[in-house]
Image: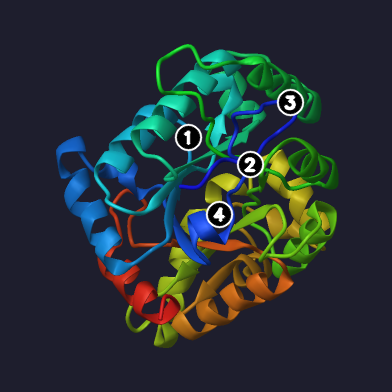
Amino acid sequence: MSAPAVNATHPARDDRAGRGRLGRVGLWTGSLEGVPVAQVPDVLGELDDQGWGSLWFGEAVGREAFTAAQLYLGATRRMTIGTGIANIYGRDASAAGSAARTLEASHPGRFVLGLGVSHAPLVERHRGHHYGRPLSAMREYLDALDRTRALAAGEDVMPPVVLAALGPKMLGLSRDRTAGAHPYLTLPEHTARAREILGGTGEDGPALVVEHAAVVAAGVGDDDEVWRSRAHDHLTVYTGLPNYRNSWTRQGFEESDYVRGGSDRLKRALVTRGLEATRARVQEHLDAGASTVLVQVLGENMLVPPVQDWRLAAEALLG
């Protein structure tokens, strides 16, 4: 990896997290939570072989983000691993900075730290913290992260940081303070607005790492119920979270779309059906200014990696 970009506040932070590090198309998955540690290398070795540029995962109630990232980095040879996202309420900024530096030193150029404020129910009920005002909480966390310094030998470089950002103010904070943004459950129209806020383009501007969900199982084009069932299961939790409902309202949806599992209109907008529709949607996001599109391939069971479907998606999207 070449010398990191110099940042006036944090001179040893690498602020590049665009296509050179992540590739145009990557994967997002929560299914690894269902894989025992001993079996993770087999699953991720397959993904490495398939040619994906990066693999991203979340942090809710399963594995802790940084230990999971170390596990996944150790199980792969070349893919970049990104947290999508590490919950800022899961650890203080000092711990996050130290962990991120260790991962960067262990696997240079292969880790991106995605940070986010998560959601009030997860922060308050599951973690027992007070959920503060999102923008203020993130700004204060970044202030503390920028004050951290390397205290271990050989760990003087911070990896790129991106923020989970849906609204214009968090996108602006992503632009001003980090390497870019990681929107989730958004449309290409949102991607275009996010790029306007971030500035630049998908080629040379701040990173805009967009998640998109898809059902690509063999035969799904002829079976509406497979797509509908998987899209419903995927959206069931998210339709109950205010942050996403607010984001969807800004994108043109309304209260009637937020029934448990989402209305048909919401499903069709957020979850593509089949390889051709998914290829077209990925291109729409790239054309709108995304630097990377993370395809979340929805399998039959959310805790079983859809390895065969990943293979189909790789053949269609990575050629």
Q: Which residue is mark 1?
A: 59
Q: CA distance from mark 3 to mark 1?
A: 28 Å
Look at label 4 and name its amino acid: Leu
Q: Nearer the viewer, mark 3 or mark 1?
A: 3
**Image coordinates for residue 234, horizontal then vertical, percent:** 49, 55
* Residue drawn at (33%, 62%) of the image: 300
Q: Residues within 10 Å of mark 2 (few under 14, many from 20)?
A: few
Instruction: From the image, state whether disc 4 or disc 1 is nearer to you.
Output: 1
Label 2: element kind: loop
Of the two numbered discs 2 and 4 in the rendering, the one whose residue sits closer to the viewer: 2
Q: Amino acid at mark 1?
A: Glu
Q: How many marks?
A: 4
Q: Earlier in the sequence, mark 4 or mark 3?
A: 3
Residue, x 57% and y 73% (percent of image)? Answer: 282
- In the shown orientation, is residue 230 left or right of residue 106? right
Q: Which circle marks residue 5 in the picture? A: 2
Of 57 and 20, which appears nearest the observer?
20
Task: Give the position of the C terminus as an image quadrant.
Answer: bottom left
- Dot 1 lies on which element? loop
Find residue 297 and report its image quarter.
Answer: bottom left
Q: Is residue 138 above or below residue 282?
A: above
Mark 2 to mark 4 CA distance (whole Å): 38 Å
Q: Amino acid at mark 2?
A: Ala
- Verify CB contact (< 8 Å) between mark 2 and mark 3: no
Label 4 vs label 3, nearer the camera: 3
- Corner quadrant of residue 39: top left
In percent of width and height, residue 168 lies at 84, 47
Circle 4 residue: 235
Mark toward the start of the polypeptide (2 vs 1): 2
